[in-house]
């Protein structure tokens, strides 16, 4: 075990606290037979020396008759330390420490604060033949130490205060004679805030006394709370003047009652009106979870625990190791001093090892009373010191080490005879006590220099009332500030779950936590812990509770519906694996094959009148253009590349312009054939075979120039649109220059409109020689499709937008094919008799004059 602990210390890992797997539990028994509870007597421990070994086989003290077990323990701790020192051959050899004890029960008084009415102590003088004391230990009430301290200083006797550390007593200018053995609570605010953070409590109240000690603690606590985002619901500063306190008590009570804070931190001078307000709140049935220090863990004069709570109380106590032999000392030294009221069963602290709870008790509060008592009295019992007792124990060793250093400095100058007779000078102890550091017998470092920052460690106890007259104090955690931040607090989750009902307590928070998917939104004029929860913006998530800001998903990700996770976007493209892509590709291939079949039919029957009518070469060009129109639609299906994107737009523009210009040429040819062939017309030269070719060439060249300008300015390119469709990345061909695209589309439309206009004018020419009606209807379909295309194209997204473009190409091409060539194929294939020169002459004979 030692090797493991060494490794953990070297790595600075908080598992050093692993010994909490066998924590101590203190069995607290209420005792109000005297009506005193845990009221403490103020004690003077006047230390003096005597040559040789003196055995302390009896107690010699001036005691008030009404003393509580707590005061008895103070005396026991002094005698126990003194016995250890006197038996130690390495400290003060051949010199024994003795003590004179004066203890007086203290009473609170409005005028003087603390008035010792039972006996007047004046330790500021001594007679020549009287014993002179080397040092006086005082405990536990700090106010009395300040009152009697100046008298001790005048007489040259140093005072060592052994109660809880008080800020006022550390003023060296005001109390140059007084030293405090208790360490500063330098890390107590951080320790308490760490406990609050552990249980996720961020809305608390604080009660402190109106003195430098309480105000200084509150100031440091606010700083730690601000750094850890814990907010203060109320801060009550208890007045020390009775009239002010009574006038403000109603306000204090209302603040606590109206606040939503379930946790209240209590700190300050216990011997103040703070004790009164705690008792008053209990009888008003205002239950809170109290967080305080060990000096508030007491039984009141009514026999109740001071910090009573239906949900338990948390106490921070300076960490101390068990002093071996203390239990045996109390059991054996002068047993006749134990009366029935101070029997072993009713001693102040007794504890048992609670590592083996009853098998049928999963939670302490659910255990039957008989089972718990049977368990308690079967476990090994022992004794434990309070903080004040432990300070007195260390103070005795501080005195011994100081005297030992004085002897070592003077041993060379003294003769053996003088050494026996000469008394030690207590004034020389001042310089030693000021900077004294030593390790006590249990291995704890004791540092008397209060100017040095000391690493403080705290044991964290949970106190609960179990049966009616009993209470249980269980160590559930530990805090040490010499570990890195985040590892300073260790809590035994097993003990917490077994002994407490923390999970059933309503959270002490100002606002309910924001679930994942929401973020905190501060409320103006309120603390940072008071907020409202609002949904994250679009495509942002919060995957933890109480997030201040949402996290934006990357461009290739999208937020789920609850806005708690980012999912990878699906790459979407109109490809051949998609049903829509397969359908469109099949449609394009079928019509391109059908167009090829029509072209073959026309080539095979090229000598027939219906093929020769209206310029058969233009029919061939139109059919070939339509084949390319159908084939060009396949460029839009599949994952595009830069070359594909350029071919998409240029091929589409050129082949459709060629098809439209061919229809225009055919329409002009029909009109000229009927207008110019009439006798007397002089414009017959326009019917030369090359004229339609020029029309197609000129129209196509203009479109080619426009496409060249488009490619030169801003050509089409592959674009991944991550915002078009939620949860998808659309791979499309970006048009590049939108103006150039619409110029190309507009020019193609103007050619189509021109063809439609000319064909419409020629629609009433004789049917046999005239396909103008067919051209008119085909161009009507063509123009309708592309006019409809523009709004539909802009209203669709993703692959549907590409599908619309492919659909328009196929439908407009199919419209030209079917409207122009279907009637001719019908005559060629199904009515060959109608496809003869004889039948063509009859209609012409009926037309006597066309002009």
Image (spheres, rainbow, N blue to C red):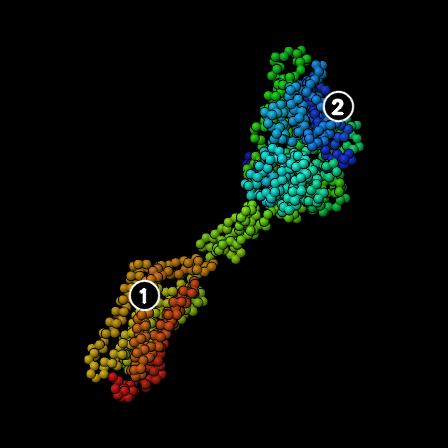
671 and 657: which is toward the camera: 671
Q: Residue at x 31, y 80 (%)?
A: 763
343 and 30: which is toward the camera: 30
Whether residue 655 is visible here, answered yes or no, is no
Q: Position of residue 240 (x, y in %)?
A: 65, 34
Q: Residue at x 36, y 76 (%)?
A: 818
Residue 80 falls in image quadrant: top right
User: Which numbered marker is on residue 203?
Assistant: none
Tag 2 secondary structure: loop
First in residue order: circle 2 vs circle 1: 2
Residue 146 in the figure: left or right of residue 553? right
Query: Disc 1 marks which residue?
Result: 744
Q: Split into 4 quadrants, where in the image is the C terminus?
A: bottom left
Q: Residue at x 65, y 17 (%)?
A: 424
Q: Position of residue 43 (x, y in %)?
A: 70, 27
Tell me if residue 763 comes above or below residue 629 in the rendering.
Answer: below
Q: Report the Cα–Cα distance between label 2 and label 1.
A: 117 Å
Query: Disc 2 marks which residue?
Result: 60
Tell me if residue 804 comes above or below residue 412 in the rendering.
Answer: below
- Crowding near pointer 2: few (<14 within 10 Å), some, many (20+)? few
Q: Split into 4 quadrants, where in the image is the N terminus?
A: top right
Q: Position of residue 786 (x, y in %)?
A: 37, 70
464 and 333: which is toward the camera: 464
């Amino acid at each position: 075990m030692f090797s493991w602990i060494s490794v953990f210390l070297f790595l600075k890992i908080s598992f050093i606290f692993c010994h909490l797997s066998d924590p101590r539990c203190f069995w607290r028994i209420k005792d109000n037979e005297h009506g005193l509870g845990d009221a403490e007597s103020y004690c003077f421990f006047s230390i003096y020396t005597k040559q040789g070994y003196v055995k302390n086989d009896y107690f010699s003290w001036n005691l008030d008759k009404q003393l509580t077990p707590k005061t008895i323990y103070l005396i026991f701790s002094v005698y126990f330390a003194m016995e250890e020192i006197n038996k130690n051959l390495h400290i003060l050899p051949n010199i024994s420490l003795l003590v004179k004890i004066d203890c007086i029960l203290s009473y609170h008084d409005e005028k003087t604060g603390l008035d010792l009415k039972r006996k007047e102590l004046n330790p500021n003088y001594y007679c020549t033949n009287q014993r002179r004391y080397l040092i006086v230990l005082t405990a536990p009430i700090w106010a009395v130490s300040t009152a009697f301290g100046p008298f001790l200083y005048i007489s040259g006797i140093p005072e060592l205060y052994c109660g809880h550390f008080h800020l006022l007593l550390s003023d060296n200018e005001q109390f140059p004679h007084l030293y405090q053995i208790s360490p500063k609570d330098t890390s107590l605010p951080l320790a308490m805030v760490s406990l609050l953070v552990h249980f996720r409590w961020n809305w608390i109240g604080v009660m402190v006394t109106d003195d430098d000690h309480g105000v200084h603690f509150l100031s440091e606590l606010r700083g730690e709370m601000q750094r850890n985002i814990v907010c203060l619901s109320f801060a009550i500063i208890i007045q020390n003047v009775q009239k002010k306190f009574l006038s403000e008590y109603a306000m204090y009570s209302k603040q606590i009652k109206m606040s939503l804070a379930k946790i209240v931190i209590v700190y300050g001078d216990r011997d103040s009106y703070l004790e009164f307000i705690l008792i008053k709140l209990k009888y008003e049935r205002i239950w809170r979870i109290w967080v305080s220090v060990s000096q508030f863990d007491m039984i009141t004069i009514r026999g109740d625990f001071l910090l009573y709570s239906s949900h338990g109380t948390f106490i921070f106590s300076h960490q101390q190791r068990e002093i071996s032999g203390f239990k045996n000392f109390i059991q054996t030294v002068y047993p006749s001093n134990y009366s029935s009221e101070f029997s072993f069963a009713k001693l102040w602290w007794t504890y048992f090892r609670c590592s083996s709870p009853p098998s049928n008790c999963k939670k302490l509060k659910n255990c039957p009373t008989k089972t718990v008592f049977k368990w308690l009295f079967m476990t090994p019992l022992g004794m434990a010191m309070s903080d004040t007792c432990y300070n007195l124990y260390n103070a005795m060793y501080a005195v011994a080490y100081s005297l030992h250093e004085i002897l070592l400095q003077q041993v060379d100058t003294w003769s053996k005879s003088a050494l026996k007779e000469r008394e030690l000078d207590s004034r020389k102890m001042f310089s030693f006590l000021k900077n004294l550091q030593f390790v006590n017998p249990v291995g704890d470092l004791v540092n008397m220099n209060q100017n040095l920052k000391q690493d403080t460690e705290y044991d964290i106890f949970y106190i609960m009332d179990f049966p009616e007259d009993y209470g249980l104090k269980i160590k559930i955690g530990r805090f040490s500030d010499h570990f890195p931040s985040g590892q300073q607090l260790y809590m035994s989750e097993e003990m917490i779950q077994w002994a407490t009902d923390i999970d059933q307590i309503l959270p002490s928070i100002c606002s309910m936590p924001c679930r994942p998917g929401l973020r905190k939104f501060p409320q103006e004029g309120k603390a940072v812990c008071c907020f409202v929860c609002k949904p994250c913006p679009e495509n942002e998530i919060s995957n933890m509770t109480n997030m201040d800001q949402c996290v934006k998903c990357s461009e290739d990700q999208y937020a789920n519906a609850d806005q708690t996770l980012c999912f990878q976007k699906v790459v979407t493209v109109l490809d051949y694996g998609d049903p829509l892509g397969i359908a469109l590709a099949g449609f394009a291939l079928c019509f391109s094959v059908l167009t090829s079949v029509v072209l073959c039919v026309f080539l095979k029957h090229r000598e027939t009148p219906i093929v020769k009518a209206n310029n058969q070469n233009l029919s061939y060009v139109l059919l070939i253009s339509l084949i390319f129109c159908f084939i060009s639609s396949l460029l839009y299906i599949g994952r595009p590349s830069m070359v594909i994107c350029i071919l998409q737009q240029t091929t589409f523009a050129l082949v459709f312009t060629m098809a439209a210009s061919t229809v225009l040429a055919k329409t002009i040819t029909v009109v000229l054939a009927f207008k110019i062939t009439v006798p007397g017309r002089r414009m017959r030269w326009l019917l030369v075979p090359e004229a339609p070719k020029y029309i197609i060439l000129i129209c196509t060249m203009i479109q080619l120039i426009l496409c060249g300008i488009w490619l030169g300015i801003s050509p089409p390119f592959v674009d991944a649109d991550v915002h078009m469709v939620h949860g998808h990345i659309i791979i499309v061909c970006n048009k590049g220059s939108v103006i150039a695209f619409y110029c190309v589309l507009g020019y193609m439309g103007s050619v189509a409109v021109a063809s439609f206009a000319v064909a419409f004018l020629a629609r009433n020419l004789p049917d046999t020689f005239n396909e103008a009606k067919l051209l008119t209807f085909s161009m009507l379909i063509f123009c309708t499709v592309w006019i409809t295309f523009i709004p539909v194209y802009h209203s669709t997204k993703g692959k549907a937008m590409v599908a619309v473009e492919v659909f328009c190409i196929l439908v407009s091409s199919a419209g030209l094919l079917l409207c122009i060539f279907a009637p001719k194929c019908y005559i060629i294939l199904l009515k060959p008799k109608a496809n003869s020169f004889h039948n063509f002459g009859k209609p012409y004979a009926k037309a006597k004059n066309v002009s």
